[in-house]
Amino acid sequence: MNIPKECIIVGGGASIKEGLALGLKDKIKDKFVIACNYAFMHFDNNTFLAFCDRDFYKPVPKENGTLDNPDIYEELKKLSLIIGIDDGQNIQEFQLPNTLFFKRSKEYRQKDCLENGFYNSELKLTGIFALSLASFLMNYEGTIYLLGFDWTRRQPETIDEKNYNGKSDLDIHYYEKEIIHRGTGLIGAYERHDADKYFKCFIEPNLKIYNVSLQSNIEIFEKIDYNKMFDLLSQKAINQNELRQDIKNLFKNSF
């Protein structure tokens, strides 16, 4: 199996707008790319889609019949590979042939994640799950670029702590006005938690992780801009179909 030692994880942070303005989609179209959640709708040449939220995959109607998330189930059927978390949320009955499910773990695991779950912390963040997958697939060696991992939060002095509301009018996603879901404007998890606490476990001796967002509040990884990432990226083109098959074989043979 030949899993590349270079991976790009596309999150949803507003800083991705900077990359899009510089031709990001063309720059990474033949690379090992993991799209988190709705990023698959814009980066359609990804290697696979990663998600954690059952309501992202197949939203459950509320009592009044409305949905908190857009129903994209028909679109998901067209994708080549999806990897998600089965967290006891009755999602198996909706499992598509293109989807692999794994257990979730609140703790970082390197050796036994296939059996005991991939880490995405108690915050259940897809970006952390995607980074866990990438690290595992690359055998904890190589280079990973994090896009849109902004961990956006307001300046403390602007927050009314007595009447705290975790909802904000800040654009925390690069697609903010285009796709509305239950996480739109929801900023409380970022303001109430220290990002580095959740990412420090990914520091590995043979794994280099770049945070491609100079304004990101995740400080534990070296920050670079998009032009620097473009300079660093390998020029080798990846055959996506072959890579997806290698990934599926690796998971299958690891059990």
Image (cartoon, helix red, strand yellow):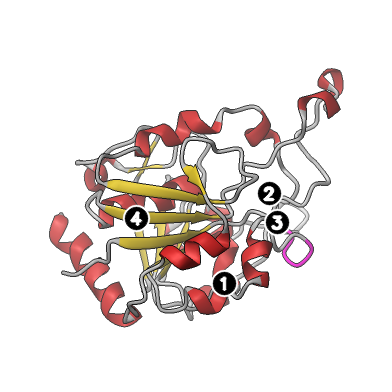
**Residue type beneath disc 3:** His
Mark 3 or mark 1, whichever is nearer to me = 1
Q: Residue at x 27, y 66 (%)?
A: 4
Question: What amino acid is labelled 2 in the image?
Answer: Gly
217 on left or right of 76: right
The alpha-carbon separation of the residues under discs 3 and 1 comes to 24 Å
Q: Mark 3 points at which residue?
A: 181
Q: How far apart are marks 1 and 4 (CA)?
A: 18 Å
In percent of the image, x 69 and y 60: which residue is there? 174
Q: Which of marks 3 and 4 is nearer the N terminus?
A: 4
Residue type of the residue flagged with mark 1: Leu
- Residue at the image position 47 percent from the left and 28 percent from the top: 197
According to the picture, the residue beneath numbered tag 1 turns out to be 24
For marks 3 and 1, the one nearer the N-term is 1
Residue 108 in percent (x, y) is at 34, 35
- Magenta range is 177-181
Task: Determine which residue is flagged by label 4.
Answer: 143
Identified by mark 4, the residue type is: Thr
Q: Where is residue 32 in the image (x, y as percent from the top left)?
A: 37, 69
Question: Nearer the viewer's eye, disc 2 or disc 4?
Answer: 4
Q: Is mark 3 on a helix, strand or loop?
A: loop
- Is mark 3 in CB contact (under 8 Å) with mark 1? no
Q: Does label 1 or label 4 sit earlier along the sequence?
A: 1
Mark 1 or 2, closer to the camera: 1
Q: Do the residues labelled 1 and 2 touch (CB within 8 Å)?
A: no
